[in-house]
Image (spheres, rainbow, N blue to C red):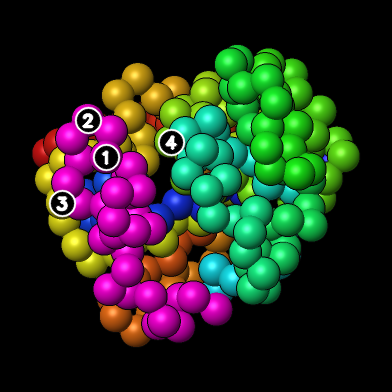
Amino acid sequence: MGRLVVSMFSTLDGVIQGPGGPGEDTEGGFPFSGWQAPFAGHDSGTVIVDSILGQDALLLGRKTYDIWVRHWPQATDVIGARFNAIPKFVASRTLADPEWAGTTVLTDVATEVAALKTTFDEIRLWGSGELLAALLGHDLVDQIDLFTFPVVLGTGKRVFREGTTPAAFEIVGEPRGFTGGVVLARYRRAGDPEFGDVTP
């Protein structure tokens, strides 16, 4: 059985919207697209590239797919080469003819993503907050790699939106800090949340 690993770039206040560049995702009037750029070139980039090279299938939500398809099909660097070489899957009920070669549309996330985990060793989801919520609801997420950037924006789409299915995770290894203040923590699925009482 393979695993589904989620990679997320997040601000300190949990915003994941529009990290890549100006105008990337302005939905809801979001004015801060490109907040990841000041940290590009730091040593966290090596870990991100290694994660990309280590996956053998790519999973995206429709909104993230629409952003990525504007760039990655034409990219020829090592990241673009990997994305273009591996099978790609996009969750959508409206996309009929994906323009990115090697892309398959998934219309039943619960069934089809579970089936993908029997075919591929490592499926990686990048961004795609709405799809993440659905995958958590079906208990299909095995690990979350959370890259937290030292910036607070106060508005935007969050890693875990209101109504996300409760779930417990445990840390995998030691959190890793990078030049520029980016921190990577890896979390593995660990059943349901537990509750207690710490009051005196």
Q: Earlier in the sequence, mark 2 or mark 4?
A: 2
Rendered location of residue 156, percent (x, y): 23, 39
Three-letter residue code for mark 4: Gly
- Cα separation, mark 1 vs mark 3, equals 14 Å
- Cα separation, mark 1 vs mark 2, equals 6 Å
Label of residue 179 in the image: none
**Secondary element type, mark 1:** loop
Task: Check residue 24 for magenta coloring.
Answer: yes
Q: Are marks 1 and 2 in contact (CB under 8 Å)?
A: yes
Rendered location of residue 86, percent (x, y): 78, 53
Q: Earlier in the sequence, mark 1 or mark 4?
A: 1
Three-letter residue code for mark 2: Gly
Name the residue tied to disc 4: 129
- What residue is shown at x 64% (from left), y 73% (from top)? 77
**Secondary element type, mark 4:** helix
- Cα separation, mark 4 vs mark 3, equals 17 Å
Instruction: Kindly report which numbered mark, 2 or 4, lies closer to the viewer in this rendering.
Output: 2
Name the residue tied to disc 2: 28
Instruction: Kindly report which numbered mark, 3 or 2, lies closer to the viewer in this rendering.
Output: 2
Name the residue tied to disc 3: 153
